[in-house]
Amino acid sequence: MKAEITSIGTELLLGEITDTNASYIAFQLPLLGIDLYWVTQVGDNFERMKECLERAWKRSDLTLTTGGLGPTEDDLTREAIATMLGEEPRVDPDLEQQIREFFSRRSIEMPERNIKQATLIPSAEAIPNPRGTAPGWWVERGGKLLIAMPGPPSEMQRMWEKEVSPRLRQRLGHEIILSRTLKTFGHSEGAVDEMVSPLLSATNPTLAVYAKPDGIHLRITAKAKRREEAEKMIAQREEEIRSLFEESIWGCDDETLEAVLGALLSEKGLSLATMESCTGGLLANLITDVPGSSAYFKGGMVAYTDEAKISHGVDPALIVRHGSVSPEVAEAMAEAARARLGADIGVGITGVADPEEVEGKPIGSAHIAIVDGKSKRVIRGSYPPLRPEVKRRAAYHALFELRRTLLASK
Amino acid sequence: MKAEITSIGTELLLGEITDTNASYIAFQLPLLGIDLYWVTQVGDNFERMKECLERAWKRSDLTLTTGGLGPTEDDLTREAIATMLGEEPRVDPDLEQQIREFFSRRSIEMPERNIKQATLIPSAEAIPNPRGTAPGWWVERGGKLLIAMPGPPSEMQRMWEKEVSPRLRQRLGHEIILSRTLKTFGHSEGAVDEMVSPLLSATNPTLAVYAKPDGIHLRITAKAKRREEAEKMIAQREEEIRSLFEESIWGCDDETLEAVLGALLSEKGLSLATMESCTGGLLANLITDVPGSSAYFKGGMVAYTDEAKISHGVDPALIVRHGSVSPEVAEAMAEAARARLGADIGVGITGVADPEEVEGKPIGSAHIAIVDGKSKRVIRGSYPPLRPEVKRRAAYHALFELRRTLLASK
């Protein structure tokens, strides 16, 4: 099946946003055994949009569009598809009802222009979009398929995952392509690449290395006639990789480090509290991204200044003696968080994210302390000297070390 | 001048990389007065690449390509351009010399396959690339222009900045295009669209509406012969828009809400402390994304549970009487943050982000309290019922209301 993506929106052509939707879909298509031949970006211009869609409809079996489904005058995807197919858009009463309810749940009256999001053409079925007001369109005619999805990535991805991908999979279903992503932390991309280098040239299963915010990911992809066969190939390759990386692999597929940690805490019936300096709340923010985290996360403190650290319970003498960026203060922060919030485990992070060195310590240096009343660990971190990098790496490093601590404690 | 970008590389179509080159160039073109009409991604396939280039050459005045200039067999951009134009590529002795020197400076012998990077066709001139071995091609024939640049972003951006953009500017140089983005908070995209609806059909300056995580943005773009003229057109339109939105406009261009707030706090010499429930540290995280925020941010507390709220200084009787998601508790949180950390201003946020309703209050409802020892404000929030949306909207809402409070206090 030959596929094509048409990404719609003048903001793409003005460089105001990058087309991450196209790369998201492009990454997903091989898992369905679908080959992507073209990606085209076009602005909110009716004529050019129609021309692009006509070309796509003609040369491809499957056309995927993103964007242009909003309520404004600029949103012309529905109109362009209808014109291309010579069909008339009509308001669908069920869709109208759903959109009105979406607004009334938020105690807002539906602006009248949103009515056009409730239109359909005879060849189109609506694809549900619980995250927004724009339903997608699943258009089928003469053996060709066109799927129109909304532009906001969270709406598009949910629609892909829950609606479009399962339906496409069911429809195709002859050759099975399976994929598994193993997620590591603690090695650089270059180091990971070297470790798996003999496996990178294999063609089935293939292996690819990706640098991500939460570490380096390894993606194994296998093709086979039967599911069990593909699963077996992946399992073998996974075993080889796991023996190379051991505990550096913290999760797989769509697992997040914060959710993996949350599951471990729940399983062991342990609670957590944090005190952060250089990460400025990012660690607590990640932890609370997990639904249900209130069951194990007692809370946190952001102690950006020395005064704040002291008022949160850090001994001022330690700061005077060792400096605020020191293993000793990290430990005192972890202890204070644990004691103040009555948690089983306390974490403290102190480091230099500021535009300048602190106490002669370079930007990017940090200390992460983990205490549980019986034992303590203080880990040194050293990150690229850029504020967002320091925050991000230190927060993920803390999550990774927390997981390691929990795994070690039987 | 009508322009088109062709991004070349199979890794784009596999979703292994996102096409940031296209958005980089797309953002630059309007500043030269060049209109971008299409972006196409195509793989390392000779036939499809040639077909894309033929279409671009025919319909556009300027075709910009990135990628496919490497030394491997997959790198076919030069060959595709030559075939499209019916010209013969030949090794250029000067280019060959330069590439050999590039290698010898790094004490490596040039692999023989790199020789193809030294080829040119009669209509092409080489564009220097000191960051890599692939020179670009500047192709001119029959009044049309094609510029081929390398794929690695650092090489492409350097080539754009130092070579391509100055040359294009010199060539065009008559028309100036300027742009200004006004950022609003508190109105929905549909509402903003309706408010500015009479201005949306204007062609110079144009106006466009974008929904972003920090609110709704309005971008004004003006074309003129002279800079002053374009500036005047933008200033007039900006005034009209400002009179419609008044204090809902919190910033412009590359300003962030957290930095705008930081600047206001610094200017007034005031400090801030936070206590967050449903936002789980995101507010503190945003505040500390600003370099130098340690000067005004005293710190924060994440009080996810009732116990944590109490241990951070919230009166338990208030929680019993009003529930933890209530204006009263939000205010007590703000007061406690302010008192505990000795800040001038305290902010408290409590709301429902969890997978379930809390105390019969629906997911997405929240209260934001701002106190400064003399006055208090408690604002009610209602957001889309998804955890990441609740966190994000409540945090930006708090930043926006903090700014409003500071502006009101003379």
Image (tube, coloured by chain):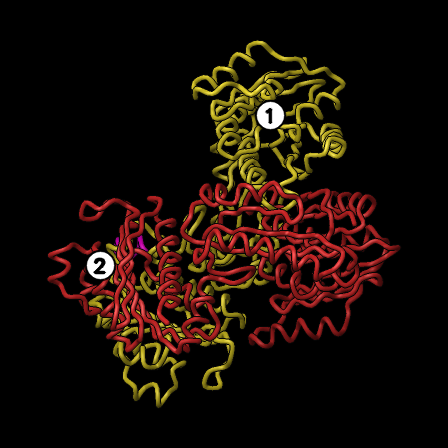
Chain colours: A red, B yellow
Query: Which residue occupies 54% across, 70% down?
Result: B384
Q: Say whether residue B270 is visible.
A: yes
Q: Amino acid at mark 2?
A: Thr
Q: Is residue A31 magenta?
A: no
- Quadrant containing the C terminus of chain B in the rendered view: bottom left
Residue B264 among magenta residues = yes
Percent x, y for residue B367?
41, 75
The image shows residue B309 at horizontal and vertical percentages of 31, 78
**Is most of the magenta stretch helix, strand or loop?**
helix
Same chain for the residues at labels 2 and 1, yes or no? no
Q: Amino acid at mark 1?
A: Pro
- Which chain's residue wears label 2? A
Q: Which residues are magenta?
A: B262-268
Specify the quadrant of the image occupied by residue B90.
top right
- Chain of the residue under label 1: B
Whether residue B1 can be seen here: no
* Front position in the image: A58 or B187: A58
For label 1, the residue is B71
Disc 1 is placed on an element classified as loop
Image quarter where the N terminus of chain B lies is top right
Q: Is residue B191 above or below residue B311?
A: above
| Of the two numbered discs 2 and 1 in the rendering, the one whose residue sits closer to the viewer | 1
Classify residue A172 as left or right of residue B60: right
**Could you tell whether A155 is left or right of A345 in the image?**
right
For numbered disc 2, what is the local secondary structure? Answer: loop
Q: Is residue B263 above or below residue B319?
A: above
Q: Which mark is residue A305?
A: 2
Establish if A303 lies above or below B172: below
Residue B306 lies, in percent from the top left, at 35, 81
Quick one: label 1, few (<14), some, or many (20+) residues within 10 Å? some
* Residue A115 % position (x, y): 70, 66
